[in-house]
Image: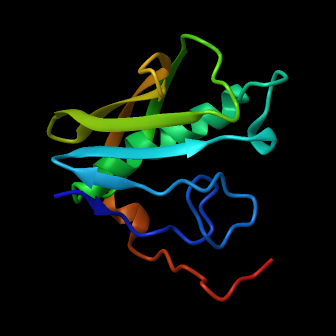
């Protein structure tokens, strides 16, 4: 059953509290994380297309979040982003990520951004190290409204 993941406060990619957030809403079903969005000039690089950093940020979030959604507290140690075609603005895009492999301390995930006609525009892979100690004393300030 598809379920929506909670928002992440001030997250640059999916935070509802961040007025500069890209604004993604994430869903997960059968271990596959998905989202749909229409990007606009706030994410523009070349005229009419998304900035490479925006698409990298989207895949960074998707590939890491699918690992977190599976219950692993991890930190990214490597991201590999491949740009296949320019990512157009003002058109629905589809984002998908999944875990590809789990080792003793490393988890590997993969992700793609596709246009509505299923053309892969950006793909990526990530390596995440299990590191719960990094998040033991993290406190989230939900009162912050900048």
Image quadrant for the C terminus?
bottom right
Vertical placement of residue 33 versus 48, above or below: below
Relative height, residue 86 to residue 129 (above, below): above
Q: Residue at x 75, y 66 (%)?
A: 19
Q: Nearer the viewer, residue 68 or 120?
A: 120
Quadrant for residue 38, please give it. Answer: top right
Relative to residue 137, is residue 11 drawn left or right? right
Residue name at image x 85 percent, y 23 percent: 47
Residue 75 visible, this angle: no
**Residue that appears at 54% across and 10% down:** 84
- Which of the 4 image quadrants contains residue 41? top right
Which colouring convention does the figure follow? rainbow
As drawn, which residue projects farthest toward the bottom?
143
The quarter of the picture where the N terminus appears is bottom left
Count the marks: 0
Residue 89 higher or lower than 145, as above or below: above
Q: Quadrant of residue 124?
A: top left
Looking at this view, name the residue that lies furthest to the top.
84
Point 48% across, 57% down: residue: 25
Q: Position of residue 6 (x, y in %)?
A: 41, 69
Q: Nearer the viewer, residue 98 or 87?
A: 87
Relative side of 135 to 103, left or right: right
Residue 94 location, x and y as percent? 45, 35
Quick check: can you spot residue 145? yes
Residue situated in front as seen by the camera: 104 or 58: 58
Q: Is residue 22 left or right of residue 103?
A: right
Residue 143 horizontal/vertical position (percent): 66, 89
In the displayed structure image, the side of residue 15 where residue 102 appears, left or right: left
């Amino acid at each position: 059953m598809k379920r929506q993941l909670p928002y992440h406060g001030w997250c640059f990619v999916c935070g509802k509290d961040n007025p500069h957030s890209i604004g993604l809403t994430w869903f997960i079903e059968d271990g596959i994380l998905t989202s749909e969005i229409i990007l606009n000039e706030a994410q523009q690089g070349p005229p009419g297309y998304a900035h490479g950093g925006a698409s990298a940020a989207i895949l960074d979030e998707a590939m890491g979040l699918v690992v977190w959604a599976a219950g692993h507290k991890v930190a990214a140690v490597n991201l590999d982003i491949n740009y296949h075609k320019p990512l157009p603005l003002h058109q629905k895009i589809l984002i998908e990520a999944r875990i590809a492999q789990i080792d003793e301390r490393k988890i590997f995930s993969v992700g793609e951004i596709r246009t509505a006609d299923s053309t892969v525009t950006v793909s990526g892979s990530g390596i995440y190290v299990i590191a719960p100690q990094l998040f033991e004393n993290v406190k989230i300030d939900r009162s912050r409204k900048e």
